[in-house]
Amino acid sequence: MRIAVFPGSFDPVTVGHLDLIQRASVMFDKVVIGVLNNSAKKPFCTVEQKMEMLKLSTQDISNVEIESFDGLLVDFVEKKNAVAVIRGIRNSMDFEYELPLAQANHKLNANADTIFLATRPEHSYISSSAVRELIKYKADIKDMVPEPVYRFVMDEFAY
Ligand code: PNS
């Protein structure tokens, strides 16, 4: 079974993430979504909320699993017996940032390769940080997040 890990902060998950998960799920037998549990960072959503939103957003994709992890990504990848890490690339800045991380991760675990998927052009402006910023000003984020995230934001922030 060929397993890939799709890691991230998912704070919150966006339609860009979801599209990449969907595309990766066709390429691999199983995609494990690894939600970083970073206690040092004050997140917008709790890990439980992130996982619930990911679960609701991916319920139509049968070969997806959602788990949280802390520590090094390579250790999580090894624990899951994955052969690949999937990362989305929106622009050259993403590539500059991601390339050394992919190289370091490969140095640490040569059994797994990072695969970069080009995001759809219509998603290239979408990021979790932009979504968080827009929520602060109660702006319309409907096209940027999956429906369960939109509902969560509407409930939580009383738009
Ligand atoms: O969604 P993000 O915030 O871009 O995801 C970043 C993530 C979780 C992939 C990255 O921060 C990560 O892998 N963190 C775990 C710690 C680690 O392994 N760092 C790499 C050192 S080379």
Image: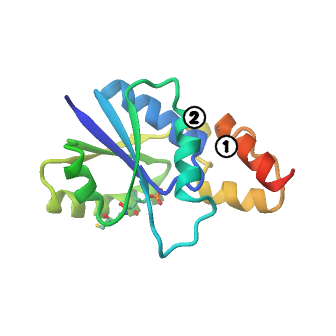
Viewer-nearest residue: 118 or 19: 19
Q: Which residue is mark 2?
A: 57
Q: Disc 2 to disc 1, how far (Cα)?
A: 8 Å
The picture places residue 129, in percent across and down from the top left corner, at 62, 60
Q: Which residue is mark 1?
A: 149
SS for tag 2? helix
Callout 1 crowding tier (Cα within 10 Å): few <14, some 14–19, many ≥20: many
Q: Is residue 138 left or right of residue 49?
A: right
Q: Amino acid at mark 1?
A: Val
Q: Is residue 92 left or right of residue 124?
A: left
The residue at 59%/39% (across/down) is 15
User: Which residue appears farthest toward the right when viewing the image?
Assistant: 159
The picture places residue 127, in percent across and down from the top left corner, at 59, 53
The residue at 47%/71% (across/down) is 39
Q: Quadrant of ligand 1?
A: bottom left
The picture places residue 16, in percent across and down from the top left corner, at 55, 41
Q: Is residue 78 above or below residue 142?
A: below
The residue at 71%/38% (across/down) is 143
Q: Is mark 1 within 8 Å of ligand 1?
A: no
SS for tag 1? helix
Mark closest to the chain's N terminus, 2 or 1: 2
Callout 2 crowding tier (Cα within 10 Å): few <14, some 14–19, many ≥20: some
